[in-house]
Image (cartoon, rainbow, N blue to C red):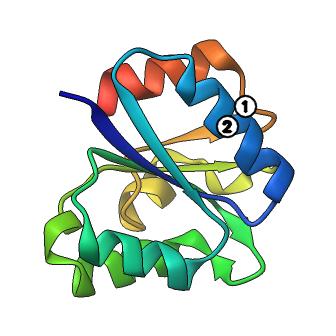
Amino acid sequence: MDKKILVVDDSKVEGIYIKFLLDKLDKVDATVCPGFEEALELAEKDKYDLIIADYYTIDGTSDMLVEDIREKCEKNAETPVVAMGRDIDFAEEDFLKNNGFINYIEKPVKFNMLKAVVALYS
């Protein structure tokens, strides 16, 4: 069975790139969306094995998205969420835990790191 992964990134180019990387992995079905509203709609509709969310977006910071998913999307209330971003000032362990993330990926995303995150958390 395929691992379903939701990627939230407001950069169309980076979203396409991450989808390209995920498509290289066996048994991974990745969906990319550009914003929180669409991410919430998808998370209400389908169960995901992993959510990867850009931390800084036009919609705000993805800790707000995690909170909404936990409260509003019963199917994904326990789904692991990995933050990603260029600035790793948010990537301290206590901050991540306190805001609903299990880990982070630094941008630009490297294939081996993405592969490891998928293997570990989905």
Q: Is residue 7 visible?
A: yes
Density class for disc 2 (Cα within 10 Å; few <14, some 14-19, many ≥20) is: many
Residue 109 figure quarter? top right
Q: Mark 2 belongs to which amino acid?
A: Ile
Q: Which residue is mark 1?
A: 109
SS for callout 2? helix
Q: Amino acid at mark 1?
A: Val
Alpha carbon of mark 2 to alpha carbon of mark 1: how far? 7 Å
Q: Tag 1 or tag 2, which sits nearer the N-term?
A: 2
The quarter in which the N terminus is drawn is top left
Contact flag, marks 2 and 1 (Cβ < 8 Å): yes
Q: Toward the viewer: 88 or 10?
A: 10
Q: Position of residue 20 (x, y in %)?
A: 67, 30
Residue under pointer 2:
18
Where 109 falls versus 32 (above or below)? Answer: above
Front: mark 2 or 1: 2
Residue at (73% x, 67% y) in the render: 56
Tell whether 60 sits left or right of 104: right
Does residue 28 appear to the left or right of 114 in the view shown? left
Q: Secondary structure at mark 1?
A: loop
Tell me what residue is drawn at x 19 percent, y 69 percent. 77
The residue nearer to you, when weighing 94 against 117, is 117
Q: Nearer the viewer, residue 4 or 94?
A: 4
Q: Which mark is residue 70?
A: none
Q: Is residue 106 visible?
A: no
In the displayed structure image, the side of residue 1 where residue 115 appears, left or right: right
Q: Position of residue 104 (x, y in %)?
A: 55, 42
Report x, y in % for residue 64. 50, 81
Q: Where does the image place residue 10, in percent across and percent down from the top left?
A: 75, 66
Residue at image position (80%, 50%) is 87
Disc 1 crowd rating (10 Å Cα; few below 14, some 14-19, many 20+) is some
